Every structure is written in C-alpha cells, then in structure tokens.
Image (cartoon, rainbow, N blue to C red):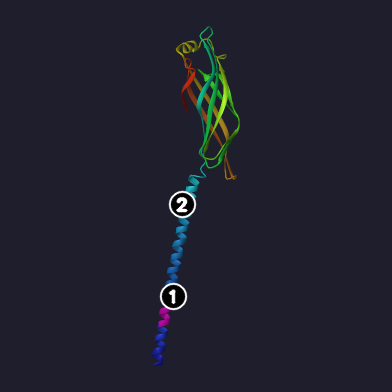
Amino acid sequence: MEEQSYQQRKTEMESAAEVSKELKRKKRMKLLVYALAFAIFQTIVILVFSLTVMRIKTPKFRVLSITIEDLQAVTTNPPYFNIKLNTQVAVKNTNFGHFKFQNTTISFDYGGVGVGDALVARGRSKARSTKKMNVDVELNSNNIPNNSSLQSEIESGFLALTCHSKLSGKVQLMKLIKKKKSAKMRCAMLVNLLTKAVQDIKCQ
C-alpha cells in the first residue's frame, strides 16, 4: 500500500515537473516571439525614420511675384529701357531641419545679355517651411547690342526676360548632421510695357 502511494506520488511529481517544463518552454517561446516582434517594429521605425526625417532634400528657390515700381521704354535709336522691380522670392525647405543659406545674386538677362542683378541676403529657412523675401532690382539695356531685336519687342509692348541664381547653404538636422545643398533657379517672364506688369512667370 505504501509502495503504491509512493509510486503515485512519484508519478504526480513527474507529471507536475513535465507540466512545469512545458510552461517554461511556452514562456520562452512567447518571450522569443515578443523579442522578434519588437526587433521587427524597431527595424520598421528606423527604416521610416531614415526615409523621411533623415532624408535630406534640396530646397527649392523660386520667384513668386514681381511688381514694377518704375518703367521707361523708348524705341529711339538706340532703343532703351530702364525698369525698377520689387521681386518676391521664396526658399521652400521640406526637410526636418533648417536650411541656412549664404548671400547670393539673382541675375536678370535679356537675350542672353545681363541687364541687372538683385542681391539676396543670407538667412535661414526653418524646418518644413517657406521663407519669403522681397528684393529690389534695377534693370537697363545699357549692355544690349544695337543689332538686337529690342526695338521690335518694345514696339510689340512685351519684353521677354529670364533670371537665374544658385542658392548655397547647409541643411542641419538635430544639431548633429549638416549637409551642403545648393538650390538652383531659372525663371522666364514677360514684361507688359502697356500695363506695366510682369506676367507669365515660369520657374524651373
């Protein structure tokens, strides 16, 4: 009787040990699954962070609008124009860090000949924002050769102008990462001599 009781207790103990071992195994498996899921989650977070926050894009530099302050255009020999403009430009920064840029110049051309320059002072475009600035410039035809089509354009009432610039600076992320970026701009426009307005501004 005692031997049977002993065997029973032994069997129960072995059974309890097996159950305990199985519970521990399931617990280890559960912890392993949790650790694997956490590792996958971290990898996804790091990947998304790298593709969005840490990806540094080149800011965009554009002419938004131009207002004519004063305009003189004559078809005498030689033909001549003098135009004072107020130009609004914008630096669009889509990065998660600010873009600090240096002084630059916007050069205006007529038929490939320089007719005036506008100075853009150094500044900073905040993270994921657009910085707008107003700059003044005076354009004249002093350097345009006499054999150009300037006279016929003034007679038509429209002047075709272009402007171009390169804005250089650095994008800074979390005060740790700095990367040099240069935003290039090239715009074309028409000056309406009759209405004294600049129209059809197209930038690349």
Question: Most prominent secondary structure in the magenta stretch?
Answer: helix
Q: Secondary structure at mark 2?
A: helix
Membership of 14 in magenta stretch: yes
Q: Position of residue 115 (x, y in %)?
A: 55, 18
At x 47%, y 57%, the residue is 39
The residue under label 1 is which amino acid type? Ser
Q: Position of residue 91 (x, y in %)?
A: 53, 33
Q: Which residues are magenta?
A: 12-17
The N terminus sits in image quarter: bottom left
Give the quarter of the image for residue 15.
bottom left
Residue 20 circle label:
1
Q: Secondary structure at mark 1?
A: helix
Please tell me whether residue 159 is drawn above or below residue 119 in the rendered image. above
| Viewer-side residue, 14 vs 170 | 170
Would you name the residue on which mark 2 appears? 44
The CA distance from mark 1 to mark 2 is: 36 Å
Q: Position of residue 100 (x, y in %)?
A: 59, 36
At x 44%, y 62%, the residue is 33
Q: For mark 1, does the 10 Å Cα neighbourhood hold few (<14), some (14 to 19), or many (20 or more) residues?
A: few
Please tell me whether residue 21 is drawn above or below residue 186 in the rendered image. below
Residue 120 circle label:
none
Give the quarter of the image for residue 121.
top right
The residue under label 2 is which amino acid type? Ile
Work out which residue is located at the far top of the displayed protein and give it.
Answer: 77
Please tell me whether residue 78 is drawn above or below residue 34 in the rendered image. above
Mark earlier in primary sequence (1, 2)? 1
At x 48%, y 49%, the residue is 47
Q: Is residue 172 left or right of residue 8?
A: right
Q: For mark 2, does the 10 Å Cα neighbourhood hold few (<14), some (14 to 19), or many (20 or more) residues?
A: few
